[in-house]
Amino acid sequence: MRLLLLSDTHLPRRAKALPPQLLDEMPRADAVVHAGDWVDTATLDLLTARARWLIGVYGNNDGPELRARLPEVAYAQLGGVRLGVVHETGPAQGRERRCAERFPDLDVLVFGHSHIPWDTTAGGRLRLLNPGSPTDRRRQPYCTYMTAEITEGGLTAVELHRLPRRH
């Protein structure tokens, strides 16, 4: 099972559209995971129409329309992997401990908010993934997203993808 992970798209404020490279990944993904800060409902509608399975949450910049359609925390069972999605996890310091305590029954937690890619393991079991942002790199050198595979009940082949700089 192939996953496409993204967050913090902030359309149309930070970009006018999702990058073509990201859209090209969608048909190859069995599930698309968005960790919040969509900002507009058009992006949610686009991903809903294109994704085989969309798992998403709202973020701090998402208004009432998105909050009415999306949960604050989402959970899914994917190929034997217990996945959770949330927008904010608090400061980087202490993140592993806080997330392991808050989500003791998960194998993977996808989060956003910081626009900073993150890939660590908390407590020897909970994989924490932040795909960064495909549209707003902030203090990062590149805009990013992630892909991953679920094979034999485990998360494998996690890859951070750098997007070309916009001019």
Image (tube, rainbow, N blue to C red):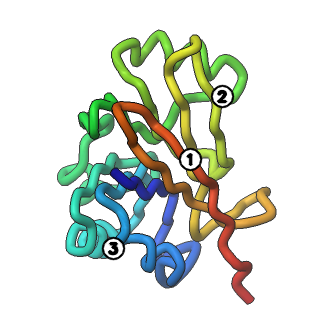
Tell me the kind of residue under disc 2. Answer: Pro
Residue 12 percent across, percent down from the top left: 47, 77
Crowd band around label 3 with a 10 angstrom C-alpha radius: few (<14), some (14–19), many (20+): few
Residue drawn at point x = 46 percent, y = 54 percent:
5
N-term mark: 3 or 1: 3
* Residue highlighted by disc 3: 27
Q: Which mark is residue 158?
A: 1
Q: Which mark is residue 43?
A: none
Q: Is residue 20 positioned above or below 138 on the image?
A: below
Residue 81 percent across, percent down from the top left: 33, 31
34 lies left or right of 112 = left
Residues 6 and 57: in front is 6
Q: CA distance from mark 1 to mark 2?
A: 23 Å
N-term mark: 1 or 2: 2
Residue drawn at point x = 50 percent, y = 15 percent:
100
Tell me the kind of residue under disc 3. Answer: Pro
Q: Which mark is residue 91?
A: 2
12 lies left or right of 81 = right
Q: Report which quarter residue 41 is drawn in.
A: bottom left
4 lies left or right of 42 = right
59 lies left or right of 71 = right
